[in-house]
Each structure stands twice: as structure tokens, then as C-alpha cells.
Image (cartoon, coloured by chain):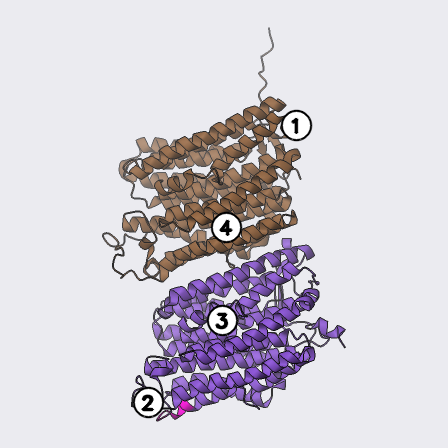
Chain colours: A purple, B brown
Amino acid sequence: MLTTILIALPFAGALVVWAAPLSREATGGLAFLVALAEVGMWIGSARQFDFGAELPQYATEREWFESVGASYSVGLYGFQFWLVGLTLVVGACAIGYGVWAERERARAYFGLMLFLIGALVGVFAAQDLLLFYVFFEAMLIPIYVLVGVWGGERRMRATLTFVLYTMAGSLAMLASIVALGLSQGTFGLDELGTSENDWIFLGFLVAFAVKAPLLPLHGWLRLAYTEAPPEVGALLSGVVSKAAVVGLVWIVLPHFPGPVEDWREVVLVLAAATLIYGSLLAFRQPDFRGVVAYSSMGQMGLIVLGIFSVNELGLNGAVLHSVSHGLVSAALFLLAAMVETRAGTGVFAALGGMARGRPVLATLVLTVGMFTLAVPGSSNFAGEFTILAGVFEHGWGYAAIGAAAIVLAALYTLRPISAILHERRGSSVREEADDLVGNEAALVVPLVVILLALSVWPAAITERSFPAGGRAAPAAEESP
Amino acid sequence: MIGAATIPTPKVDWLALSPTLALLAVSGIVLLGAVLVPRSFERTFSVAVSFAGFVAAGVAAGIVFDRSADASLLLAESMTRDRFAALAQIVLAAIGAVVVLVSAGDRRRDHVGEYYALLSAAGAGMVFFVSAGNLMTLFLAFEWFSIALYVLCALDTHRRASLEAGLKYLIVGSFGSAFLLFGCALVYGATGELGFNAIRDATGADDPLFITGLALILAGLAFKVSAAPFHMWTPDVYEGAPTPVTAFMAAATKVAALVVTFRLLVTAFPEQDEVWTIAIAVLAVASLLIGNLAALVQRDVKRLLAYSSISNAGFLLIAIAADSELGGQALLYFLVPYSAATIGAFAVIAARERELGRPVDLVGLEGFGWERPLLGVALWVFMLSFAGFPLTGGFLGKFYVFAAIFEAGWWWLVVLGVIATAISIAYYLSLVRALYMRSAELPGSVIAVGGSPPRDRLLDAAVGLAVLVTVGSFFVVQPLVDLARDGVSALPF
């Protein structure tokens, strides 16, 4: 039941926020309250959550479309529980930032943000293939408008490329869903058997490769991530991309063991290429958000590397890294926004010397930066290390590439840190010490605190993600 | 003494006829009212009476549905009484009632009574059309509602576009009728039978005349479905006709024509299904291609929606091409969100038209979403439904159609439909973009003449109802599908 509430509450909140004639402050406050209530419920539910359970927790199943064998079936396995938590925390921070930034047309804006959060929770909690698609697509509706209305100057192009890429992928998946579900007479993820059909597999793969994104389907990424309002960018790169993770882990791997085996090298090569290419591009970007955008692409490549190692190590690492990357990426987008509100630009050439007189900003940028480059001891390091260990079992070459990417991460992370915080004072940076105010810091600090907690205890996630019995990695069982 | 002469008359099933008769009666009453009722009261009277007529027809059809678990033939096998027809009648009556609400705010000065009388008459014709049981009644009903529609299109006599639309529809529509009539004649010539069931059982089905007749009948019906390549009239007529009439044509005509096409093909021509499934699939593919590609370059919103309706005809025809019970269910289900979104979209356009005092193009919609939040969101919902996004019935409709054709083994039509959907998103979203993402303050944009008109409660109610059905059909899909299954089970599978 709880899962249903977690899904329904944001949708209901969206409707109220949109329809109720409240002032801007009241609207934002109400939306933020809903987001916080969600986080509270999620934390409250953690204590009774059975992470090793064979069945989804807090599940609800209702009849919906019996004729084709689809039902409203939601519930959480361990890794989904963590991803939902990521969604809610980042969502609350994003809405909080929206309140602080006093977004125009508040009723529509906060309504859409809540709608997006509801859809995201739905994606992570769906235990029915058709329902998964419903939420997967529903996500697109608010993103389209949020970017198109509140975005930067090139928002029209950004929405167009984003929608074109995503829909091309999603519709391929729809065809696959029709084929898979109808040939088996059910859409329940737990009841669906396996399929050996390469085409059906590819339909799913394309959809998730666009969402992640994997090379060469990343064309939408730069504009969408940087033209979106920063808090929407935080959700996009931090959380929305993780829809690909849940899709690959819970739909592709268990239901297509044969095609996964056949196509594994292709995907691994693409993921490794994404990792290297994204990292290199991140190094070359002239502005803060550009760096974050492409670093996000590189990290998703790493996560896919972990998933397609198809063993417990790689998968657990992928989940841990999904969560820590989501938090890091959201924090970076918010910090980038805070830099931009101060300097009016995120272009490195016009920035510099911001550490002077701004200790809070400097500390936060530096700390989050350290997580990004996966300093040993950080949760990101734990995640990357586990992924590399997992993929090493499959082939040492991939692990070597992944290790090289950590060096690249250091390159692209240190560059913005020095370009923003140090060096000579940039032309756009004002002289007065306009450090982060309490409200701004209060949005980023929780993310950092969670990251620190995960650094201390990464096993919280790596040992609590998948039901025992190796259902997530059936191929791993076969290989000794 | 010669015994009292008794002339044998067929038993008349008044209940089965009641939806048609209710609308016919209303049509007459409204026409009388146009003469007898004082001018100042004429609009209210016509609206109230025709609305009541459509509601009554819907209720009557509901009763017929309830009491017709077994299909039966009436009046010398010229009419069918079954749940399939009754369901279609309910949908048609609901469409008519909502269109009356949309029309009520029209600032039409003359022909008020005639307008509603013709609307009811067209509705009566369609309601009769879907229960046709032989080729004679089929053609009769076809002409009946067509003639009413020709006049309705041309009713705005002060607008050239309206007159042009009426004339175009008349000429092209007559072609369609001629095809249909010739086809009926050929089939009759080959089999010597008129009744659908009798044609199925007749010998002589391998006669080339018979197949030619089937093809001509299909062409005639395809005109009304506005399936490519018989769609040429659609954009011009939809653009020129008064907007509520366009809404009625796009929703009701399509429902009636598709339902009858399906019934005719599976009842009278089951032996020839290898021929006509291919023919229907070709029509569907052509409609998807032409509708979607042409819609991409439209600027006038009514033309854009016209091409969108052609592409939707393609999707609906796929359901027929499946030639199965599942296909019939998909057809009946999909028609519900399709009709709701169509009427709703045209209703919003009508509201904007009345505000601007001129035809609405994409520029004319700029900023509309922020000025009129409810209508804007409604139009957005309708576009999402057309584009097949979740949380609207349009998504499940498309999904169900794909499911039906996949079960029939034609997976390539699924792929084609998916590609068509991808293309369609571009133009549906261009409407949403105009609504929200361009501000009306840009130079060259439009300003409403004389400020915004007083709120039109009836139109708002109609749009609200359309949104409710569009979104509601997503959530309560199974009950609707169960109804559709009851309806389709009346057909011989």
C-alpha cells in the first residue's frame, strides 16, 4: 500500500497545486511539503523493509486491463527501494530550489514537478511491464513542458531533440512490449518468462540506451541537461537517467538471457566507449553545467558496464553507483545554479577566484567534486570499485578502461574546481563576498550528508539490493 | 361476407427503432419550433430539445443493449438488433449530445432551428446506419446522414469557406455514394441477395462481379471514414465547415462508418477475408502515411486536425484488418477516447475562434494555454491522447489495436503504426508548443477582438466531459473492454 501512496501522493499534490488558487509562496510551500512528506514516509518505511525478500515489498496489485493480462502492480525490491529514495530526496531538493528561485507561473511549475516525481516513483516501483511503460512515458510530459517553458534560450531545440530521441526509443520499446507481453499472455514482471527473440530485446535496449544515454544515442543530452532549469537538470541527470538502470536490470537481464549473452560484448564496448567519450567531452566543456552533463553521461556508461557484467558484484556496484551518482549530479547541478545566480554565467572564462570570501560555496563545490572524482573512501569510489571488480570477472580489458576513466574523472573535476574557485577573479565575479545563504546551503548539505553516510557504509546498498537466489543475474548462476 | 381482409405486416420492433425515432421526432419538433417559437427563445428551445433528443436516443440504445443479449433481424432482415449496434448508437448519441453543447455558444444569427434540426436528423441517420442489416438500408441510411451533413457544412451562408466546404463535400460525397450504390448493385447481381447474412450464405461468391462489388462498397465507405486515398475532401471540408459540425463529422461519421464497415465485412464477406484484410491494411497504411506526413506542414489548426483524423482512421482500420474479435473490441474501445479527444479539441478551437473572430492557425493559439488555463490543459490532454501518451485512453486504444493486429500475425503493421506514432508526435506537440512556449506578446501575434467573450458554460462543460472520458477511459479500461466484448460477440466469429 505504501508504494501506491508514494506514487499517488505527488500526483494528487500536483492536481491540488495546479487547481488551487494559492499565492506563489503558498504553492511552492505546499509542493515542498508534499515532497518532504514523501521523504518522511520513505524513511519511515526503511525500518520494516525486508531487503532479501523474494517478493516485492509494500506491494499492491489491482485489476486494470485483464483482457491483455496487464494489471496495476507496484512494489519494491531492494534496489528499487534505493532508487525511489534517491528520487524523493533529489526531488525534494529540486522543489526546494524552485521555491527559493521563485519560479514564474508557480502553480503550473510546481504541479509539473510533483507530477514528474510521481511518475519517477512509478517507473521504479512498477512490477508490470505495461505499467512500467505508462510511467516511463508519463515522465516525458512534465519534462517536455518544464524544459520548454522554464528553460534557457535554446530550450525549443532542447525539447525537440529530447522528445525525438526519447520517443524513438520508447516506441521501439512499445512494439517490443506488445510482442513480449502478448506472446506470453501476461505483463507481470514476476510472471513473464524469458524470450530468445533478438528484435524484442533490441527494442528494449534502444529505449534504455537513449535514456541512459549510451553512445551513439546521446545527441539530446547536452542541450536537455543544460537548457533545462538547473533543478530540472538535477532530476534529469540524477534520477531520470536511472530509469534506464531499472529497465536494464529488471526487464532486460532476467527476461532475455540468450540475447544478453549474444549482445553482451556489443553493449559492453558501447558502455566503455560512452565512459571514455563522455569523460573526454566533459573535460572539453567551456561551462560548469556542460561538464556536469557529460560527466553524467560518462558515469552512466560505467553503470551500464556494471550491469552488463551480469554478476552480483557488478549489479550491486551499479545500484550503489546509481544512487551516489544521482546525489552527486544533483548537488553539482544545484551548485552550478548557485554559481550562475552569482556570476550571471557558468562559462569558466568569466569565472574564477570565487573561493575568496565564499567559504561555504567553496567547501561544498570541493566536497562534491571529491565525490565526483571518486576519492578512495567515498561512496562513488566504492561503487566504481565494485563495478570494476564485477566487470573484471568478465574481461580485464573493460576493468582497465574503467580504471583509466577514473583518471579522466579527476581531470574533468579538477578543471571546474580550479576555474571557478581559484585563479584570478573572473570578469563576471563580483567583488563582494556573496556566499551561499542558509537556504541554498540547506538544499545541498543534505545531499552531501547522505553521500558521506554512504561512504561510511556502502554495504547498506550493496548488500541490500537484490533478492537472494540470483534472479537478477540468471546468467551468472550458470557460469561458475 | 368475405372475412375481414388482413394485410400481413411485418412485426415492428419499436424498441429497436426508438433511438432513431427519438432523434427524428426531435428533428421535427425543432423545425416546427423554428417557425412557432419566438425568435428570442429559439436558440434555448432548439438546444434544449435536441440535447434531450440525443440523451433520449442514448438511453433508448442503452435499453436495447440491455435487452438484446441475442442478436435478431428485424423488418424483413433489413435491420439488426444486437449489442454491437446498440453500443455504437450509445457512442453516437453521446457525441451528438456533446456537439449540441459545443454548438450552443455559437453566435449564429440565422438558421438556428435548422441547424439543430439537421444535426438531429444526421444523428438519426447514423444511428439507423449502424443497425443496417441489408444493402438497401445501408445505402438509405448512408444517404440520409450524408445529405444532412452536406447542408450543415454549408450552413454558414455568409462565409465563402463554408459554402465551398458544402459544395466540395456534396460533390465528392456523391462520388462515394455512387461507388457504394454500384457496389451494392454488383453484389446483388452476383448473389441475388441483399441481406448481409444471406450474402454470406449465397452461392456465386467466386464471381468476379462479386469481388468488384465488394471493392466498390469498401471504396464508398472509405470516403466516409476519410481513409486515404479517399480523403481528399477531408481537410477542405473540415476547415470550411462550422467548427461544431466539423467536430460532429470527425467523431460521429467516423464511428458510424467504421462500425458499419466492420460489421459488413465480417458478416457478409467472411469468405473473402483474404482479399479485404489486405485491402483494409493498404488503406490503413496509406492513411497513416498521408495523414501524418501532410499534418506536419499544416498551419491551420482545423486542417491539422483533419489530417490527424485521417491518420487516426489508419489506426482504426488496422483494428478492422485484424479480422478478429480482439480487433472488434479494439475498434469499439479506441473509438471512445478518439471521439472524446476529437470533439474536445474542436470545441477548444471553436472557443478560440469565437474569441479571435477568425480561423485559428498555430500563431492564433500562442499564449492561449496561459490565458485560458482550463481549455489549454484540456487541449493538451487531447493532443496527448492523439499522440498515444499514457494516462489517456488514446494510449490504450493504440496499444489494443497493436495487440489485435499482432495476434493476427501482422507484426509489420505494429512496426508501421509505431513509426507513424513517432511522426505524429511532432505535430501534436507543435500545438502544445504554441499553447505554452511562445508568449503572445511577440510582435505579429494576435489580440482577441473586443476582449474575451463571456465564458461559455456549456462549452466548458463539453470540454470537461471530453477530458473526463479521454482520461477516464485509461483508468476504467476493463469495464469498457467488457462492454466492447459483449458488443462484438453479436458478430459471427
**Residue found farthest to the left:** B450
Q: Is residue B5 above or below residue A51?
A: above
Magenta range is A356-362
Labelled pair 4, 2 in contact (Cβ < 8 Å)? no
Q: Gap in Å between the C-alphas at discs 4 and 1?
A: 39 Å
Asked if badges 3 and 2 are on one and the same chain, I answer yes
- In the image: residue B481, left or right of residue B93: right
Q: Quadrant of the C terminus of chain B?
A: top right
* Residue in front for this viewpoint, A314 or B475: A314
Q: Secondary structure at mark 1?
A: loop
Q: Chain of mark 1?
A: B
Labelled pair 2, 1 in contact (Cβ < 8 Å)? no
Residue under the image location 36 percent in, 67 percent down:
A21
Which quarter of the picture shows residue A286? bottom left
Q: Secondary structure at mark 2?
A: loop
Q: Gap in Å between the C-alphas at discs 1 and 3?
A: 61 Å
Residue A87: in sight, yes or no? no
Q: Secondary structure at mark 3?
A: helix
Q: Chain of mark 2?
A: A
Q: Which numbered marker is on residue B206?
A: 1
**Residue found farthest to the top:** B1
Q: Which numbered marker is on residue A117?
A: 3
2 vs 1, front mark: 2
Q: Which numbered marker is on residue B337?
A: 4
**Amino acid on which disc 1 is placed:** Asp
**Amino acid on which disc 3 is placed:** Ile
Give the residue pinned by disc 2.
Answer: A425
3 vs 2, front mark: 2
